[in-house]
Image (cartoon, rainbow, N blue to C red):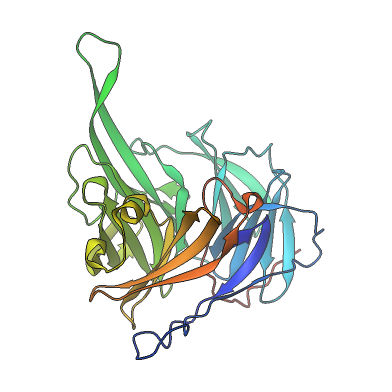
Amino acid sequence: MILDSRVCSLRFDLQKIRIEDEEDLVDPSMKQISIPNIDDQVEISRVYHCDGLLLCIPKDNSGLMLWNPYLGQTKWVRPKNTFHRDDSFALGYDNNRNHKILRLNEENESHIDVYDFSSDSWRTVLDDNPYRDELIYQSGVSLKGNAYFFDREVTTEAEVGTEHLLITGIEDYLRCFDFTTERFGPRLPLPFILPSPSFEYLALSWARDDKLAVLYSHYDTFDIIEIWISTKIEPNAVSWSTFLKVDMSLINGLTDDFLIRFEPKSFFIDEEKKVGVLFDTKVTETGRYQMAYIVGDDGYFKSVNIGVISNSHWIGGELVRSSYVPSLLQLQV
């Protein structure tokens, strides 16, 4: 997690949930992690994870910092040209297990920058995929070496008698960046039946290093949350199965105001316990709090207060989170 521009680790133990007298058994512990060979004054705005590596983005956009927390190794990657605040990144690797960094620039969507670990250099490749529409850059998740993003096609028509455009349809789907071919693949369907025009919130996660998980709730039925997991996932193909479907309105103690405002920006799942852990913020008269909500399809629900969020902790309306699995991958400095 990123808190107050510092990288922190959050340990979340689910082993004792769903048992009698479980009160306070889910006890998250969070601590700041010192980054070796990095000045404590360096502020981190975002972090991306793949294969045990963290890609940290400094607030000043001066460069990129690769970090293996398990081995305590770091490596600075300098830009080929100036980074921008709205740039987005992803970590991945090709079929030869050669790791790479993807840089996406919203100002020039036809060009993609790729950093190659093996050559320690950047190169620009032309994105010749005509089907990439409105890529949601901040949604990226790395899985099996490739990066997956939400993409969206919006159709409009002119409003009679005005210069305004009316939205007549919104289609959401996935797009994969293949680090072997260094190209975006075709549209990958999401498992939901979406009304048109569709207004919803989506979140992307992964499970066991080999499955994508996607969370969905539609604004017209905001109290229903669905989580699906992939049964097959490749750059050009995906299939899905239902993991959870929760009607939050049936949970005692949740108000309509809570349900309307509830929009988890990130989550993870525990397949063995059959639960999802959804992260959101809670605003009260006494302050703003980072919350985790554990939900199950049998009506199980538990809220966990992780801690107070000060204004200095607030990054673009949400906290940055990424699951982490340790790795012995060596960084060549």
Q: Is residue 32 left or right of residue 184?
A: right
Q: State which quadrant residue 248 falls in.
A: bottom left
Tell me residue 302's x, y (percent).
Answer: 38, 74
Is 187 rendered above or below residue 134? below
Residue found at x 34% / y 85%? 18
| Lateral position of residue 202 relative to residue 79, left or right | left
Quarter of the image with the C terminus is bottom right
Instruction: Identify the image quadrant of residue 66.
Output: bottom right
Quadrant assignment for the N terminus: bottom right
Residue depicted at 45% across the width and 67% down the height: 292
Outermost residue toward the top in this view: 161
Position in image of residue 317 (x %, y %)? 52, 47
- Residue 211 x/y as whole percent: 36, 69
| Residue 130 in the image: above or below residue 49 | above
Visible residue check, residue 180: no
Percent position (x, y) of residue 12? 51, 77
Report the front residue among 114 and 212: 212
Q: How many marks?
A: 0
Q: Quadrant of residue 3?
A: bottom right
Seen in the image, is 330 located left or right of residue 102? right
- Going 73% across and 73% down the picture, which residue do you hit? 72
Determine the residue located farthest toward the bottom in the rendered image. Answer: 20
Q: Is residue 60 among what the camera can see? A: yes
The answer to which of 8 and 309 lies nearer the viewer is 309
